[in-house]
Image: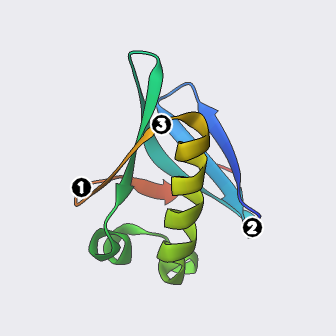
Amino acid sequence: MSDLRFVPRWREELEVIGHGRKLVFELILEIGHFHLYFPTETRWAKVAPDWARGRWAEYHTACTTWCEAQKARLSVVDDAHVSDGPE
């Protein structure tokens, strides 16, 4: 079970909190359901913060589980956004 916590934000973002840090992903509300855009492993290696680089599988699994529980779509794409969240 993941120790990550999920907080949808009003700016079409999903904040994922864990390991004493935050990551922010693009989360769009489409006709009553969320759609999360998650980076491919290649994209993750290029744009994820240094501390998160080796955690693609962990975050992908946790986000997939969250999306299933929320009845949200998850798309793994080459241009997805991921960044450190504000403190």
Q: Which mark is residue 72?
A: 3
Tell me residue 36's x, y (percent): 42, 43
Residue 26: name its quadrant: top left
Name the residue type under label 3. Answer: Ala
Colour setting: rainbow
Location of residue 11 in the rendering, given as x and y in whole percent from the top left corner: 50, 28
Q: Please report the residue visible at 77 percent of the width from the left and 66 percent of the height from the top.
A: 20
Q: Amino acid at mark 1?
A: Asp
Left or right: residue 63 versus residue 76 is right
Closer mark to the observer between disc 3 and disc 1: 3
Q: Tell me the tag on residue 1.
A: 2
**Mark closest to the chain's N terminus, 3 or 2:** 2
Task: Report the residue at 54% width, 55% height from top.
Answer: 63
State the residue in front, 60 or 39: 60
Which label sits on residue 79? Answer: 1
> Taking 35 as reference, is 19 above or below it?
below
